[in-house]
Image (spheres, rainbow, N blue to C red):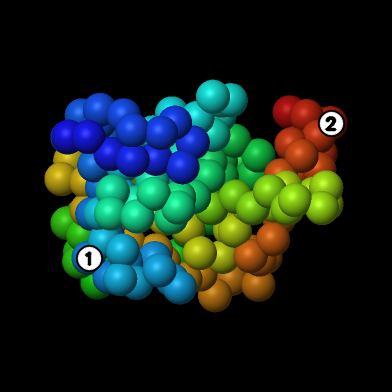
Amino acid sequence: MRVNTKAYGSIEVDERQLVRFPKGILGFEKFKEYALLDAERQPFYWLQSVDVERVAFIVVNPFLFRADYELDIDDAELAEIGIQDPEAALIFSIVTIPADGSPMTANLQGPLVINKEDRLARQAVLTDPRWKTKHDVLAELAAAKKAPC
């Protein structure tokens, strides 16, 4: 399938890269189909709408900079996307990179949960007060490297 992307122009995407959000992503509910693409810089990825080129998100695995990250998601919400076992899920956080040079942040309050098998996904909303919509990724990476093992 050919997809027009914000980062790479028009590219060919394998169907295994496609992800469906039946309820959309908060604020972008009308966009349901996305492609998960490698970004030029690891460990980041692009979550690109297959319908609208300008709708794309940079995402990252939150466990890379917050080993203590915990998701308390209702089993019914996970069942909506066919997840019975947490091992069947990929977890991503949406990253914001402000144009004004302020710190790059990740949304740990609203993780994206993707069923690895059938690629159905949803955005969860966590109520744990530890997780905010703006976690400074680089500061937390630096803190994690300094933490004792």
**Which quadrant: the N terminus?**
top left
* Amino acid at circle 2: Lys
Q: Residue at x 53, y 53 (%)?
A: 94
Q: Earlier in the sequence, mark 1 or mark 2?
A: 1
Q: Are marks 1 and 2 in contact (CB under 8 Å)?
A: no
Q: Is residue 10 above or below residue 134?
A: above
Q: Position of residue 7 (x, y in %)?
A: 49, 36
Residue 136 visible to an observer of this rendering: no
Name the residue carrying label 1: 22
| Direction from residue 104 to residue 74 in the image, left or right | left
Q: Is residue 61 above or below residue 122?
A: above
**Which quadrant: the C terminus?**
top right
| Direction from residue 107 to residue 78 in the image, left or right | left
Residue 145 visible to an observer of this rendering: yes
Which element type, helix, strand or loop, lies under badge 1?
loop
| Direction from residue 23 to residue 147 in the image, left or right | right
Q: Residue at x 39, y 49 (%)?
A: 53
Q: Residues within 10 Å of mark 2 (few under 14, many from 20)?
A: few
